[in-house]
């Protein structure tokens, strides 16, 4: 049975740590290299409670990552860093799963506005399959470059896309508010994310201009045929991890409340990581440290609106777990390999 050698770049970050944990226990993966500048030469076992051979690996500086001797590299790096690394690694025959937004939007013209940099890899951008297996599985088999979805985008697209596709909700006028734990911002040492600023507080940010807006619109449109401009308000919440997204959609004429939950159940029947539950039972605590998304929908008939609620762990289904799920799909492995130990 083939065992795939893997490297994690950005291994000292929150997503990189989670990837290291998951990959160190993946039955078809051997972790071969961990790249981190700040932890260069430290033993992985001294930073994380790892078991097995992964504990003896030493972090290596990112400068040497052109020499990645692994079949697959997981890039848990900022988007500009991934944009530079991915083509170099692909040219050396290394398969790449990128956790950043560098390859998510399809169109290079969108990058200056939403990510603040110009994109110089239009061919890779056009060709990179989107690593959200529940909605884009067909693209993933054999992929050499996987573009892993954003955390908010995962929670929101999984809730919204089937409701629009079913015709029960309209593609225009969708509005979403989603709260995220602070780990969503990465290991930033800035005042805004310090304990005293974040603790016991809630605040909205980047209203209507968050980088996941075009990603969500693209994913819903590809799955459901159309998605009008979507309004998104992210909110920073005083928890470590987890996202709760509340999505409001206009009900189509004649759509009945009971049909909404049935549309979600039909869309995700047989999916190991998506559970449909009553909308007021969707809880971050139930998905924390797992690769699951819990979601539900109900109708506010008086207002003519559907309300869909979705919860994920931003570091697992929103980042590292999803990356491993998409990697499994690309390799032809069972999608749950290495992820089942995180909790069923
Ligand atoms: N946190 C989350 O919930 C999610 C994150 N993502 C994406 O995954 C990627 C990693 O995120 P996350 O782990 O949160 O980020 P962190 O900030 O926690 O970690 C990023 C890591 O990348 C390395 N790095 C390499 N080059 C640079 C650079 N120029 N500037 C800063 N860091 C650099 C750093 O390691 P070192 O200094 O040791 O080399 C750092 O630890 C990002 O693209 C992020 O947008 C996606 C979905 C969810
Ligand atoms: C709380 C918080 O700050 N969250 C991050 C989510 C980052 C993410 O998912 O990633 P990409 O940068 O890869 O799109 C944000 O809003 O930017």
Image (cartoon, rainbow, N blue to C red):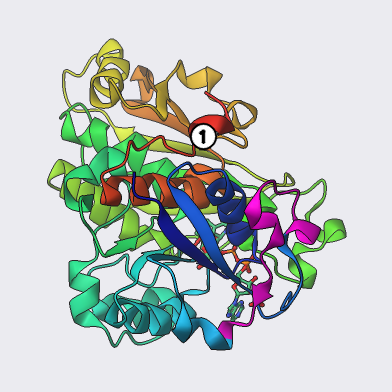
Residue 221 in sight from this viewpoint: yes
User: Where does label 1 land, which residue?
Assistant: 311
Left or right: 139 as drawn, with respect to 39: left
Residue 280 screen position, x and y as percent: 53, 19
What crowding class fits label 1: few (fewer than 14 Cα within 10 Å), some (14-19), or many (20 or more)? many
Q: How many marks?
A: 1
- As displayed, is residue 211 above or below residue 281? below
- As displayed, is residue 327 above or below residue 159? below
Mark 1 beta carbon near ligand 1 (under 8 Å)? no
Q: Quadrant of the N terminus?
A: top left
112 falls in the magenta region: no
Q: Which residues are magenta?
A: 45-62
Q: Residue at x 60, y 32 (%)?
A: 284
User: For this rendering, which residue is in front, 6 or 181?
Assistant: 6
User: For this rendering, which residue is in front, 144 or 211?
Assistant: 144
Q: Secondary structure at mark 1?
A: strand
Q: Residue furthest top?
A: 258
Residue 113 screen position, x and y as percent: 37, 78
Residue 175 screen position, x and y as percent: 39, 45
User: For this rendering, which residue is in front, 58 or 149?
Assistant: 58
- In the figure, residue 59 lies in which quadrant? bottom right
Q: Residue furthest right?
A: 196
Q: Residue at x 18, y 68 (%)?
A: 127
């Amino acid at each position: 049975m083939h065992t795939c050698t893997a490297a994690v770049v950005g291994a000292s970050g929150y997503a990189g740590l989670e990837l290291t944990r998951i990959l160190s226990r993946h039955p078809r993966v051997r972790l071969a290299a961990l790249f981190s500048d700040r932890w260069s030469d430290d033993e992985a076992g001294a930073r994380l409670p790892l078991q097995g051979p992964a504990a003896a690996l030493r972090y290596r500086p990112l400068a040497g990552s052109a020499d990645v001797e692994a079949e697959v590299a997981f890039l848990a790096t900022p988007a500009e860093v991934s944009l530079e690394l991915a083509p170099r690694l692909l040219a050396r025959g290394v398969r790449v799963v990128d956790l950043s937004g560098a390859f998510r939007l399809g169109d290079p013209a969108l990058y200056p506005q939403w990510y603040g940099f110009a994109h110089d890899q239009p061919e890779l951008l056009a060709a990179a399959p989107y690593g959200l297996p529940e909605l884009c599985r067909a693209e993933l088999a054999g992929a050499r470059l996987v573009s892993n979805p954003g955390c908010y985008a995962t929670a929101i697209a999984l809730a919204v896309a089937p409701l629009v596709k079913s015709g029960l909700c309209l593609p225009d006028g969708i509005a979403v508010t989603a709260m995220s734990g602070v780990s969503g911002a990465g290991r930033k040492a800035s005042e805004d994310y310090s304990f005293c600023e974040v603790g016991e507080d809630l605040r909205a940010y980047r209203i209507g201009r968050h980088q996941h807006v075009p990603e969500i619109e693209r994913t819903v449109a590809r799955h459901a045929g159309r998605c009008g401009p979507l309004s998104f308000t992210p909110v920073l919440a005083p928890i470590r991890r987890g996202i709760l997204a509340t999505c409001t959609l206009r009900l189509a004429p004649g759509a009945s409340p009971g049909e909404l939950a049935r549309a979600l159940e039909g869309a995700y029947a047989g999916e190991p990581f998506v559970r449909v539950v009553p909308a007021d039972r969707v809880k971050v605590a139930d998905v924390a440290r797992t690769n699951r998304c819990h979601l539900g929908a109900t109708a506010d008939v008086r207002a003519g609106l559907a309300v869909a609620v979705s919860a994920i762990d931003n570091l697992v289904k929103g980042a590292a777990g999803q990356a491993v799920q998409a990697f499994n799909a690309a390799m032809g492995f069972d999608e749950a390999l290495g992820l089942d130990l995180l909790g069923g």
